[in-house]
Every structure is written in structure tokens, then in C-alpha cells.
Amino acid sequence: MRARDLLHPRPEGLYCPPGDFFIDPVRPVGRALVTHGHSDHARAGHGSVLATRETLDIMALRYGEGFAGATQATALGETIDVNGVSVTFHPAGHVLGSAQIAVEHGGIRIVASGDYKRRRDSTCTPFEPVACDVFITEATFGLPVFRHPPDTEEIGRLLKSVKQFPQSAHLVGAYALGKAQRVMKLLREAGFEKPIHIHGALAKLSSYYQSRGIDLGDLQPATLETGAKGDFAGAIVIGPPSAFVDRWARRFPEPISCFASGWMRIRQRAKQRGVELPLIISDHSDWDELTETILETGASEVWVTHGREEALVRWCELVGIAARPLHLVGYEDEGD
């Protein structure tokens, strides 16, 4: 069997003909295997969804209980037979519940990474390299310019600014699933014990993280309805990036705009967004981590998807690994 006979791209997403299923399809299909809960990978309307318990719970929180015709939860490391194809979910280290999906049939093992990171993150299970014949890797930050600094240093910069400007509220833009909770946890690990104020859009997901044993400390709603504007002097307020471009953000005292994202490596992006304190904190692997992971898998062939595909394909060719871009469409950078 050839690798492309086991998995290949279709308009709906990556398709496995022997198992008759798709991985992270971008439109409704009969059977979907989902790597994680970000909306560009986890969509409603499928006939059935196989995913980790956390991913299924997150999809229910985002889309409602009836987001699919049927659901099946799998544990990390558990092998499931899908129409004669062996499927195993392995930790991806991206967000809570995220997984790589290993597909094995006819003597070939292909691992679809989904989104992944290699940095320590106590809000999710760490990434585990999986030996395979073909590795399908994301390439969100697949350019040599992207080398993420330690997240502890970035949080240290935030806390230093809070100390320097006690009259200001620091407004931290962070994506609602994964990034926001990681920033909260990093603040707690750095010794920040005051309440963290959060936008209402983060409440359900943050409560779910806490229900799974991830202690985020005292989270308070970021509302001015029950107090004075000055009550938020020195506060850290976390919300989705979109919340800080409307009038809601201007209610806070002398607000300092922050954004936690791997894209903050690019100064022009920070400037375009009006970000005063860019925090380079990413839930995706940087260039060095992408290339190191490819080597760790031992894959003889690499397929590159949703990101800066050409540079990573070229790097693979230079080190003697066959590689090609998949040109899958419909994937964004929600969890960057």
C-alpha cells in the first residue's frame, strides 16, 4: 500500500479511504476524527466524531450538545479499530485534549500532528513524538525567523509592566481556548496571586479547565457594572483579541494593550494591532521545534500543511527527507 492510498487530501479534509473517515474535516462529513477543539479543526454537523473526552466536551461547550449525530471518546494511547484501520491518539501539547492521530494499515503508519507545541505547558498533556513512516506536520511558524523566547520571560515582562504602571489596567488579548488559560496559569506560576479579571467569552472554557484539575486561581468577571473604573488600576484583564478593539476596552483606567501570540515576533503585526506590550507566547512549535520533531519521528516522508509550507518542505529536502505541501484550505491560526 502507498501512503497516499491510506490518507490523501480532499476538499473536505484529509481522507482515509480504507477506514472511510476524515481527519479535522472543514465541512460536514459522515465520520470525523478531530485532533482538538479549535474551531478551524473542530466543526459542528458531522455524522459522528471520534476525539478525546476533553475535545468532545469543548465542542459541546462551543456548539451545544447536539454538535454531531454521535460521539465516541478515546483515551490517549488507546488503539481503536475503524473499519480495519488502527487509529491511536497521542498527546500534541497544543491545548487541553489535543492529540496527534496515528493511522496504521497495510504496514504503513502515518501520523497527523494537528496543531502542536513542544514547550512545557501545565494546562495540557505534553507532546510525545511518535515513530512513523509519514509525518504530517503543521507549519504555522515554519520560517527560520520564528524562534519563540521562553514564555516565563514574556510573563515576566508583563508583571514588570504591571509594577511600573500601577495606575493602569493591562489588557491581555489571548485566544479563548488554550492561550488564555495558559497565560493565567503562567501568571500563577510566576507568583501573581491577585484576582485575574476575564472577559465573559472566557468564562465557560476557563471553568471547564478548572473542572479538569487545572488550578487557574481566582478569576473575576471583567465588568465595571458593579464597581468604579479605578477599581481596575493595576489589574490584569484577559479577553479574546477582538474584545480590545471596541468600546469595552476603553472603560478601563489608562489601559495598556497587550497581546499573547507567536505573531508578536513580527513588529509590524504588533504595530498594526496597536499593541503596546507584545508578548511572544505561542501554542505552536517554532522553526527549531518543527525541524527537531520531524527528525525525532524518523519519518522517511513528510507532508506539510496549513502554514509556511514551502520553507519546511525545502528544509526536508536539504536533509534528505522526501516532502511535499498538502495545500489544505480552511485552517486559520486561532490558537497561535
Image (tube, grey):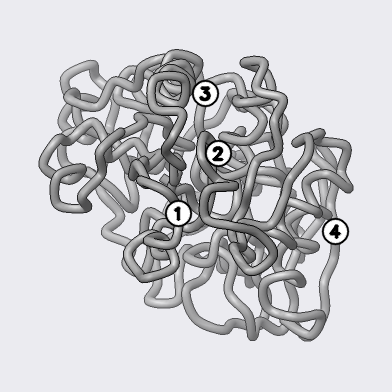
Residue that carries the numbered disc 4 in the rendered image: 73
Examine the rendering and report whether any part of residue 183 can be seen.
Answer: yes
Q: Secondary structure at mark 4?
A: strand
Give the CA separation, mark 1 to mark 2.
9 Å
Give the CA separation, mark 2 to mark 3.
30 Å
**Residue shown at 81% from the left, 35% from the top:** 214
Residue 142 appears in which quarter of the rendering? top left
Residue that carries the numbered disc 3 in the rendered image: 118
Q: Amino acid at mark 4?
A: Ala
Q: Amino acid at mark 3?
A: Arg
Residue that carries the numbered disc 1 in the rendered image: 252
Q: Residues within 10 Å of mark 1 (few under 14, many from 20)?
A: many
Where is residue 217 drawn, in percent x and y?
Answer: 78, 35
**Residue shown at 76% from the left, 59% from the top:** 84
Check the image and name the residue furthest to the left: 268
Q: Which mark is residue 320?
A: none
Residue 199 against residue 45 in the figure, above or below: above
Q: Amino acid at mark 2?
A: Ala
Marks 4 and 3, the one that precedes in the sequence? 4
Where is residue 270 drawn, in percent x and y?
Answer: 20, 42
Q: Residues within 10 Å of mark 3 (few under 14, many from 20)?
A: many
